[in-house]
Amino acid sequence: MLIRKNACSKIILGLIIFSVMLFSHYRTIQVKASSSNNYLVLVQNSDKTWTAYEDVMEQSSGGNLMIQAKPIALALNMKYIERSDGTFRIKRSTYRYNTYTIGERKYSFKSSSTLSTVRTAVYAPYISHVSGKALIHSSTINSMVYNKYFSIANAAEFRAKGYRGVACFSIYGEITEVPSIDEVVNSFGEKYFEGTDLVEVVPIDQETENQGSGSSGSEWQQEVEKLTYQTENKLIFVGDSRFNNMSRWVQPSVNSEFIAKNGIGYEWFLNVAIDEVTELIKPGDVIIVWLGVNDYYSTSYGSDSWLAYAETINNLANEEWADCKVYVSEVGYVDSNRIYDYYGKYKMMNVSQLGYEYEINGIQEFNEMLKSNLNENITWIDTNAVIGINSNDYELTPVSYWLTRGNGKKDGIHYGKDVSVALYNHFVDAIFK
């Protein structure tokens, strides 16, 4: 009997200890979730007030700001649809919606009954281990609503309330400044914050200094810069297969969109790409055009292709794209010897004028003429020097530059992954630094 009592006592004691440990672990999880979820989401109402939503935005392990797909869709009066094929959709209207796949950065944007484009998110959707909800990168719904993120450096009122950042969404118009806290309401239309008196806020530069500094600044300052950098206006890449390859290989450091297609040139730019870019852009976005390698020698668009490109881009920068910053990239080098090695012939359309004495002459002439005919409000970006090509470089370029095809050979047209990533970083640095 004594033995049984001792056994029962041990079992009961064990259960108590286990319960305490479980409760302690549960509390730890809850505290962690709460401490990492202090971003405020604001959705504008028709009366210009802003409804506040807590715990709708989460930060990924890589520092990307993600938003819960279903809650933000419902907050914006849009539909959230889970589909039988495992994808999910955020739908504003019959022909305007995004379709996402968990784990894939590529998503589709339907903008009309006939037009659908594939875009690339900064970070792939995933299921949160904290909330259990599907998360998307907040910038992906820019195609349907206005969206702007304010870091604590630019939102002092909310910083004083303990928030790390404020994400604002609106279907009514462009968001130019962070809302005032006295405009923020709850779901019943009541003031969200009690009183509007602010506590004294230490200036950003002073707080950074107090928290320690180094060659790259404090950890706190790095976090602010990282979050702000990743939520700037879109950088839109418009080009051919070189950009198309790049879109598959890079991990974007800024909000990037690629409108690119293999084997195309001016005709596609004029009839397809311009409309897609114009529908996508918002004031402050950046557009970079990298086209010409497939038709720099052509005379189908007038006396010379560079004049057709220059005139069209100049008009866009002054009219449809006037609220954006427009860049044009130097068309990168093509190696006719590599093309011959891969295809067994020189009569490829984009090398037919490459060569008299030097392979680089044809494209160099295109670049020089295009650059000289662009307006002053358009910025030119060099590329050849980034990949080791200079105007006086008459030697064959290293084989490592070129994309390796299925037969193991280098085609001489498309840059490999390392060069493409280096070019992406070069474009971002040239534009944002």
Image: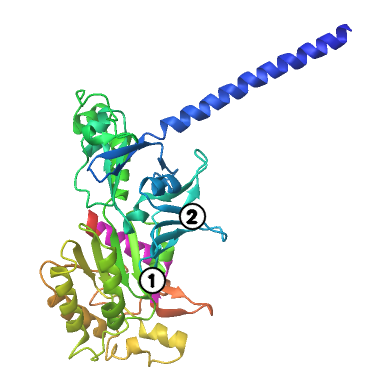
Which residue is at the far right?
Answer: 1
Label of residue 113 in the image? 1
Q: Is residue 276 above or below residue 78?
A: below
Q: Is residue 240 above or below residue 428?
A: below
**Would residue 132 be visible to someone looking at this image?**
yes
Q: Which range is magenta?
A: 414-429
Q: Residue at x 38, y 71 (%)?
A: 113
Q: Quadrant of residue 179?
A: top left
Mark 2 residue element? strand
Q: Residue 297 carries which label?
A: none
Q: Is residue 204 above or below residue 368?
A: above
Query: Which residue is located at x 20 percent, y 57 percent?
Result: 284
Q: Residue 357, relative to residue 24: is it above or below?
A: below
Q: Check the picture and name the quadrant holding the N terminus.
A: top right
Residues 72 and 247: in front is: 72
What's the amino acid at mark 2? Ile
Under circle 1, the secondary element is loop
Mark drawn on residue 81:
2
Q: 10 Å neighbourhood of mark 1: few (<14), some, or many (≥20)?
A: few
Q: Where is residue 123 in the image (x, y as percent from the top left)?
A: 42, 53
Separation (CA) of disc 2 from disc 1: 18 Å
